[in-house]
Structure formats: structure tokens, C-alpha cells
Amino acid sequence: MPPASAPLRKIVHVDMDAFYASVEQRDRPELKGRPVVVAWSPEPRSVVCAASYEARAFGVRSAMPATRAARLCPGAVWLRPDFARYKEVSRQVRQIFLRHTELVEPLSLDEAYLDVTVERTGLPSATETARVIRAEIRAETGLTASAGVAPNKLLAKIASDWKKPDGLFVIRPHQVEAFLAPLPVGKLPGVGRATERLLAELGIATAGELRRADPRLLERRLGRFGPRLVELAAGIDERPVLPDRPTRSISAERTFDEDLPAPALGPEIERLARRAWEGAERRRRIARTVTLKLRTADFRTLTRRRTLPHPPRDAAEVAGLAAALLAASGLPAEARFRLAGVGLSGFADEAGDDLQGRLF
């Protein structure tokens, strides 16, 4: 439970159900009840953007290689994504949110946090607000959404997944400890398979066991994330809902037609660095951190980053730093890559200095 001094918030996390695929099924009635996969193609270079629940029943998931999805669900209907249409529906849903609160923090096109501690329409509770929002989404868009209601963002996000699809789950303040105690640690944000395996080696399988763990031991094994995990297992999350979040990173990436060896990445890195630099210039953002992202032929994703004492001067310097990160990556010479990306982050305005004011 949060400390007694912390303000008691009423947070709703709304997550649209299989959003892209559901929009396609709504707009094409003949697809209702059929397994739909949204992807550029079922070819080897493509990945799944979204899958309807009928396709998920076969094991198809977003971000899965398209070829694997085709093997799992040979009868799927494949559709290319129409992001302009999805963005328009997303804007429609956000207008529904804003009727109830000005504190809306979008996470993506299909999910958002809402702080309804002060609710605009006079509804008596956060639970009723979530119910009404879901009903309005259904009536006005023809789509369904799941929602979680809780005292903070951490718990609300976990709750929204509890009764998917088209569900509502509420965790009240007095229920937090009992709800979390038996929860598998893999349900906590940031706990991937590697962390889950490490915790299992320590005899920790549930949030209740994690809450009782020694933070110093976890810090030795997991760094600063260790003590934070203990807080998450206790349901502690004091992050406010932040509307209109600033862009935290600007990047460009490309999936290649054929896997490329490291020596062939130079021109690609230059092009990606130029695109990322131009994106930062358009947004008037000054970055100090350069990140190189690589995806290997066997779908492992690797990132390397470097933070500079002063911002890079131009796109050429960004490209040079990204190339240096590749050279220092320690990857074997025979490694081949299906995707590369260059990103900029650590923006000056986030650090609280006046660098942007001085430069512009």
C-alpha cells in the first residue's frame, strides 16, 4: 500500500481490445468471427502488428514473425495496416476520455491512463466512470475496451488485463495486498523472462514472496531495479497521470529486404542517423544520448547507447557515434542483421537546463 501521506488517486487504465484487428472487423462485417492478422504481409521480413481474438486462439500474437503466425493459423485473413484509420478512431476514443477528465495520458493508439479523482460529469465513483466510458466507446465506435480501476497506474494496468476482452476489473485500496500476494512475478511491469528466471533461482515466484525479499540482495543481483521491484510487489506507485507527455526519444529504423552483415550497415546507419536528426530538428529537441538498435537474423534485439557531455553537432556526428557503438558491440563478425535503428534521447529540456533556450 502507498504511504498514508500519499494522495489517494482514482486511476483508470483503458485498453482497446485487439484494436487494429477489431477496427478491420468492424469495417468489414464479413470478417466477424474470422481469424484476422494485421501485418504488411505473411512474408519472412514481416511481423504481426495485431491479431484478432480468433487468431490469438491459435497462438498468434503481436510482434511475432509473420511466417510463424502463418504456420500457427493457416486460415487467417491477412490485412495490411491502415494507420491513418486507426489514428482517427483513436482520436475519437480520446475525446470520450476528455469528457470525463482532462488528465489523460495516452500510451499508444489503443491505451491510456485516466486520473478520475476529480470527474467532470459528476459520476459517483471511478468504477462507474470506467463503466460509462466503456459503454460510450461501444456506442460511438462499435468497438470494445477493457478497463482496470485502482489507486495507482501500476495496479490499474494490471487490472485492465484481468478480464480481457471487454471486461472491467477493480482493485480497491483495501484489496491491494491480498490481490498482489499470489500474483506471479512475471505479471509485474519490467519483469521479463530473464528476470523471472533470476528471481526463481532466489526462490521468488510470487509478488508476495518478492515483497518479503531483502532489497539489498536484489540490488546486488539486479542493480537499482531490485529495490524498485520490492516496491512494485507492494503495489507502491506514486507516478501521476501526465497528459501530453513530451517525446522521450526520436528514432528511425529499417527492416532490410535481406539480412546484412555488419560491414554493410555503414550506409544504412548514416541514413537512419540523418532521419533521426531531422526528426529532432523538426521538434526542436536537443539530445545527448545516441542509441543503436539491432535485430539479428534469429530475432534477438540488441541496443547499445552512449550519452555525451555535449549534444552532437550534426547528423554526421550521430552516425559516427552509432557506427562506433556497432564496432564496440562485441558481436561476432559473422553476425547478420535484419533490422537496424538509430535513436536520440536524453533531451536537454528533460535535464532541466536551458540549453534549448541558448540554442534557439
Image: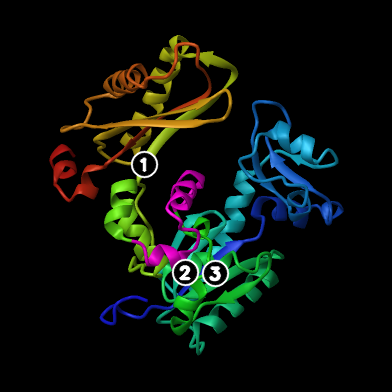
Q: Regarding mark 1 in the picture, which secondary structure is present there?
A: strand
Q: Quadrant of residue 53?
A: bottom right
Q: CA distance from mark 1 to mark 2?
A: 26 Å
The magenta-colored residue range is: 190-213
- Whichever of callouts 3 and 1 sits on the residue coming sooner in the sequence is 3
Disc assigned to residue 155: 2
Q: State whether residue 94 is above or below residue 150.
A: above
Circle number at residue 159: 3
Quarter of the figure that contains the N terminus: bottom left
Q: Nearer the viewer, residue 314 or 219?
A: 219
Depth check, mark 3 against mark 1: the one in front is: 3
Indicate the quadrant where residue 297 lies: top right
Badge 3 marks a residue whose secondary structure is: helix
Q: CA distance from mark 2 to mark 3?
A: 6 Å
Does 206 lie within the magenta span? yes
Q: Nearer the viewer, residue 314 or 212?
A: 212
For the point 71% across and 45% down, which residue is it?
A: 60
